Amino acid sequence: MIFNPEYECMEPQARKKLQLANLKNLVEMVYAHVPFYRDKLDALGLKSRDIHSIADIEKLPFTTKDDLRDNYPHGLRACPQDRIVEVHMSSGTTGKPVVDEYTMKDIDIWREAMSRTLSAAGCTRDDIVQNCYGYGLFTGGPGAHYGALNIGAEVLPMSSGNTGRQLMVMQDFGSTMLCCTPSYALYMTEEAADAGIDLHKLPINKGCFGAEPWSENMRTEIEARYSMKAYDIYGLTEIIGPGVSFECEAQDGLHVNEDLFYPEVIDPATGRVLGDGEKGELVFTTLTKEGTPLLRYRTRDITFLMREPCSCGRTTVRMHRLFGRTDDMLIIRGVNVFPSQIEQALIEIEGTEPQYLIVVNRGENHLDEVELQVEVKKDFFSDETRGLEGLRSRIESVMKSKLQIALKVKLVEPRTIERSIGKAKRVIDNRKI
């Protein structure tokens, strides 16, 4: 279902004209009202009159998470305080949080973006949406809530946690759509199994999952355990929250709401803009934001852009699902490894659960040592040492083949790796201690 065909199916050249007009307005606005950007633009000798095409966005300066933290709390606000109606912050635990301040127009934009996102997953006014993203200062819960209300669906604002209650409500209210992190969606299936709840008999048939990278195999696992179709969605607090991009029924890349957020992919080392299909760091400019607009924000997320026509009819550019992050990437003995690569390989191995923990240490010989803790399925875990040893050897062999590094695998009993109701913690890197 396409929520807003006028913009989602806009002719590309018309969209470029709209993007250019909004970009020029954005540069004028931040130059006039945000000293941080005025200084940056003055240093480059740039004014809005120097923007002649959307390609000229490459002339503009980048913005980083450190810039946001350095300007905490209001240094990047581009409008008077009396126009701010809502504030959200990052869920990070290190340093100062990043702040996103919203005017009423920003809330309307967010509502529109999330309506497109949920509609692409099949949400209609007849759905009952169980929203398990966190509320409060976190953007996940409010974003999904605004979008579902705008569509006209019934919303169950559950927030995160209290899994027993989540499952009770899912049964009693007949939820048809689930919104949460993919790792929590899987955790709920474990709790349901323990409680004797057959999720296949419930009306829930679709879900929007985001806030952390997840693999295609993890999608397959979720879809099988719920009998649902699972859609990837993407967003981040700095830009607006969820709703920046989303999958359609084709599940072939995430459509970017590019009339609202302009995407680029750059070489993370040089800042050079890369062509479509080239993997690099994702960058966004908030073309229509009023509260805290951002120029060329470096997300640290790794992906590439695709402009081939999509079978759904949308004409927006798509981004490949995330490969990981530049700051989540592990360099093990000179080899770049993303946790999502390990997850992708693990789910293909019979007998394992999609729960794992990577522990990295610096050995006595100054070489990196990596232990991969993997949960074994309940019916597979036994006292038969030979069978477990065979599974451990198989995992080590697969990882060596796919990642080109040797990992020490430790098999652990089901439910022993700590679960999270938010973003799953997949890596403990003791080399930094």
Image: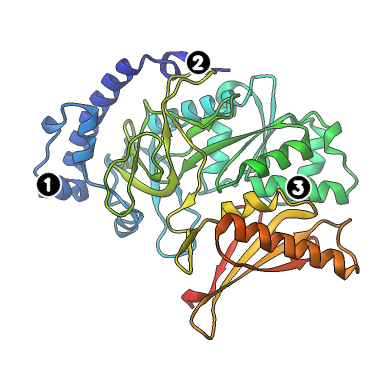
Q: Is residue 418 visible?
A: no
| Residue at image location 33% in from the left, 19% down from the top | 15
Residue position marked by numbered label 3 in the rendering = 188
Q: Earlier in the sequence, mark 2 or mark 3?
A: 3
Helix, strand or loop at label 2? It is loop
Looking at the image, which residue is at 32% across and 35% down? 290
Give percent across and percent down for residue 210.
57, 42
- The amino acid type, in three-letter code, at marker 1 is Leu
User: What residue sits 39% from the left and 33% below the top?
Assistant: 106
Query: Is tag 1's residue or tag 2's residue first in the polypeptide sequence?
Result: 1
| Residue 385, percent from left and from top | 87, 70
Amino acid identity at mark 3: Met
Residue where numbered disc 2 is placed: 313
Q: Are marks 3 and 1 in contact (CB under 8 Å)?
A: no
* Image height of 433 relative to 293, above or below: below
Q: Nearer the viewer, mark 1 or mark 2?
A: 2
Per the rendering, the mark at residue 44 is 1
- How packed mark 3 is, by other alpha carbons closer than 10 Å (few <14, some 14-19, many 20 or more), is some
Relative side of 408 to 105, left or right: right
